[in-house]
Amino acid sequence: MDPVTQTLFTMFLMFISTLVGKRTGRQEGINATVNYMIEMGACTEEDLKKANERFAEDMSDEDDYQ
């Protein structure tokens, strides 16, 4: 493999690895925070359902404008 192709291939793999790492780390952080809040009694399952419903409504409202 020539050096240019190898360099481009390596840069592409590093870019993909960075994207996957950011997404995975972000989701784990969100999950840990929600679990902690549930365990400490700061929110309940019902609160999460309401929040998810509101989020879904907001997303559908944004779709109307596009």
Image: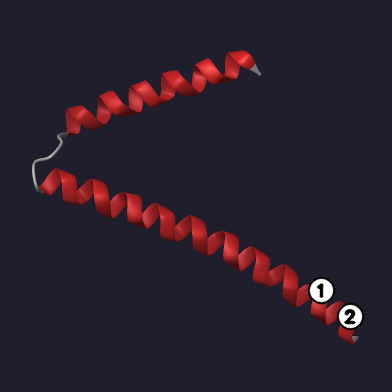
Amino acid at dot 1:
Leu
Under circle 2, the secondary element is: helix
Going 60% across and 67% down the picture, which residue do you hit?
Answer: 17
Q: Quadrant of residue 66?
A: top right
Residue most extreme to the left = 41
Q: Number of marks in the image?
A: 2
Do we see residue 1 in this rendering?
no
Please give the name of the residue rendered at 82% of the width and 81% of the height, measured from the top-left corner: 6
> Where residue 36 sits in the image (x, y, percent)?
18, 51
Compared to residue 53, the image places residue 8 above or below, namely below
Question: What is the quadrant of the N terminus in the image?
Answer: bottom right
Distance from Cα at disc 2 to Cα at disc 1? 6 Å
Residue 45 relative to residue 15: left or right: left
**Residue to which mark 1 is pinned:** 8
**Residue 47 vertical position relative to residue 3 in the rendered view, above or below:** above
Residue 60 percent across, percent down from the top left: 51, 18
Is residue 28 shown left or right of residue 64?
A: left
Relative horizontal placement of residue 60, taking residue 25 as reference (left or right)? right
Q: What residue sits 81% from the left and 79% below the top? A: 7
Instruction: Assess disc 2: are there few (<14), some (14-19) or many (≥20) residues with their C-alpha within 10 Å of its C-alpha.
Output: few
Question: What amino acid does circle 2 point to?
Answer: Val
Asked where in the image residue 4 lies, by quadrant, the reply is bottom right
Helix, strand or loop for disc 1: helix
- How busy is the neighbourhood of tag 1: few (under 14 within 10 Å), some, or many (20 plus)? few
- Residue 38 falls in image quadrant: top left
Looking at the picture, does residue 17 appear above or below residue 2?
above
Residues at badges 2 and 1 in contact (C-beta under 8 Å)? Answer: yes
- Disc sitting over residue 4 in the figure: 2
Horizontal and vertical percent for residue 5?
87, 78
From where the camera sits, is residue 53 visible?
yes
